[in-house]
Image (cartoon, rainbow, N blue to C red):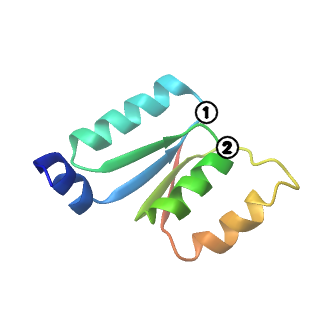
Amino acid sequence: MNYNSEVAMSSPRVVVVEDEAPIRRGVCDALRTSGYHVTEAPDGEKGLHEAIQLGVELVLLEMGHKVAPGSGVAAAQRVWAQAVPQGNMT
């Protein structure tokens, strides 16, 4: 295992859900610079999938982010939010 792999495995894991790519990149860059292992997601469905697959410690969501009704993602987010801390960005 190389140094970068060890750092990534020991760093807190965060998923950033933001549909505007420049904002998402800026937030992710700042978190990475601060030592977090960051995964980017352009929408709630992708973010939920990544968070479950990776077992993250935090999900940062865009405050006005919309989840498509009937997709099952909104219900899954409510259940999943009980286990994973979430923060909202404005």
Give the residue drawn at x 43%, y 45%.
39
Image side of residue 35 versus residue 62, left or right = left
Residue 81, how many percent across, how many down? 59, 69
Please state which of residues 28 and 46 is positioned toward the viewer in this rendering.
46
Badge 2 density bin: few <14, some 14–19, many ≥20, Cα 10 Å: some
Q: Secondary structure at mark 2?
A: loop
Q: Residue furthest top?
A: 22
Spot the residue most to the left: 3
The image quarter in which residue 31 lies: top left
- Residue type at tag 1: Asp
As displayed, is residue 30 above or below residue 15? above
- What residue is pinned by disc 2? 65
Image quadrant where one finds the N terminus: bottom left
Q: Residue at left 62%, top 47%? A: 46
Query: Residue 38 location, x and y as percent?
Result: 37, 46
Image label count: 2
Q: CA distance from mark 1 to mark 2?
A: 8 Å
Residue 19 marker = 1
For label 1, the SS is loop
Of pointers 1 and 2, the one earlier in the residue sequence? 1
Q: Amino acid at mark 2?
A: His
Horizontal arrangement in the rendering, residue 57 relative to residue 79 (left or right): left
What residue is rendered at 67% in x and 43% in y?
65
Residue 56 as seen in the image, left or right of residue 4? right
Expressed as whole percent of the image width and height from the top left, the position of residue 28 reads 38, 38
